[in-house]
Amino acid sequence: MTLAAGLALGLSFGNAAVADSHDMARYKEMFEPIPSIAPIPADNTQTPVKIELGKMLFFEPRISASGIISCATCHNPALGFADRIPLAVGHMGQVGERKTPTVLNAALLEAQFWDGRAATLEEQALGPIEADIEMAMPLDEAVQRLKEFDVYQEMFAEVFGGDDPIKADNVAKALASFQRTLLTPNSPLDRYLAGDEQALTDKQKRGMRAFVDRGCVACHRGPALSDSQFHRIQVPGSTDLGRYLVTGEEHDRHAFRTPTLRNVAVTYPYFNNGQVATLDEAIRVMGREMLNLDLPDDEVADMVAFMHALTGDMPEFAFPALP
């Protein structure tokens, strides 16, 4: 859907009561539910053992230089697979320049990281391990450390085969396989889209209308509520050049990938620098940055309510017992 199409619906926007079910049908068509299974690439099929291996690696701190940081340190399952602090903290307490994005539903995105420097989960998986400011572990040393454990030797051999299955590419494939299971279905919005008219409150339905009528759905669309594209925005306190650091293209200066709005109520604070603490203020920032207007208080409150309807069921799994 184009921005123009999203804004076109705004011609009918007002402070009227929630429309009848026939009228709301137009708004439902603008949204897609979370799929039951994430797209799976042809070269990395899902198997139970591979997923279990990826889960172990996700929680494995010994593939960090300090031996105490894992993927789950910043992508904490108890915190919406994020960390709820403004800027990520990594190796030796170093503070990064960007907020940790959630990995929930990341399998539905077409670009990873705030600046899109990786296209797939496989491409993304190894970056934090190597990054000096994150896990700070050279990949060859991470691989050697995994080889010290019989259980990893056995699991990599079972999943990948070959004479030397513990290698960086296979670590990435296993991690990506686990992350593809981190979907959050059954949100109030998903239930509403499936036909449960009572799944959303009247306030949330008004927020849904406002979300469409103001054109938010032009960028926050699809099952992940993200177009995976890059848009210029300068949020309070940010000097980050964003996508420009990847492409060098002037039009990418201060451009960032559209974040997913799935589970946005539990993955605060907001924006690339994590300097906006509440949904209320985040919506107001977007109004000013993208629409060049101050949104009315009642409309903001309705959209905040709608954002809460985007929280789905958290993934259920047993935490791994590491060797």
Image (cartoon, grey):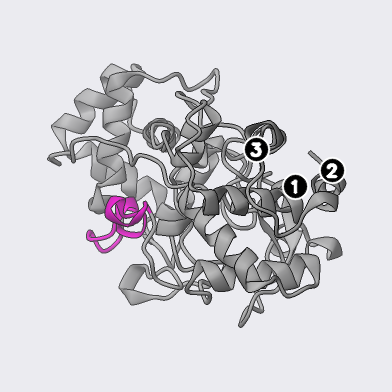
Q: Which residue is mark 3?
A: 20
Q: Considering only vertical position in the picture, is 310 above or below 34?
A: below
Give percent across and percent down for residue 254.
73, 68
Mark closer to the observer (3, 2): 3
Q: Which residue is mark 2?
A: 5
Tell which circle, 3 or 1, labels the residue nearer the N-terminal end: 3
Question: Mark 1 is on which residue type?
Answer: Ala
Give percent across and percent down for residue 114.
60, 57
Give the magenta part as a residue range. Answer: 65-81
Would you say residue 280 sits in the magenta stretch?
no
Is the C terminus in the top left, top right, bottom left or bottom right quadrant? top left
Q: CA distance from mark 3 to mark 2?
A: 22 Å
Do the residues bearing badges 3 and 1 touch, measured as CB atoms within 8 Å?
no
Residue 93 visible in the shown view:
yes
Give percent across and percent down for residue 11.
85, 51
Mark closer to the observer (1, 2): 2
Q: CA distance from mark 1 to mark 2?
A: 8 Å
Specify whether 228 is left or right of 71.
right
Tell which circle, 3 or 2, labels the residue nearer the N-terminal end: 2
Q: Which sits in the foreground, 81 or 292? A: 292
Classify mark 3: residues with Cα within 10 Å, few (<14), some (14-19) or many (20+).
few
Q: Which sits in the foreground, 197 or 177? A: 197
Q: CA distance from mark 3 to mark 1?
A: 23 Å
Q: Which residue: 45% across, 40% down?
A: 188
Which of the 4 quarters of the picture holds residue 179?
Answer: top left
Q: Which residue: 32% across, 34% down?
A: 54
Q: Which residue is mark 1?
A: 218
Question: Mark 3 is on which residue type?
Answer: Asp
Do the residues bearing badges 3 and 2 touch, measured as CB atoms within 8 Å?
no
Tell which circle, 1 or 2, labels the residue nearer the N-terminal end: 2
Q: State the SS at label 2.
A: helix
Is the N terminus in the top left, top right, bottom left or bottom right quadrant? top right
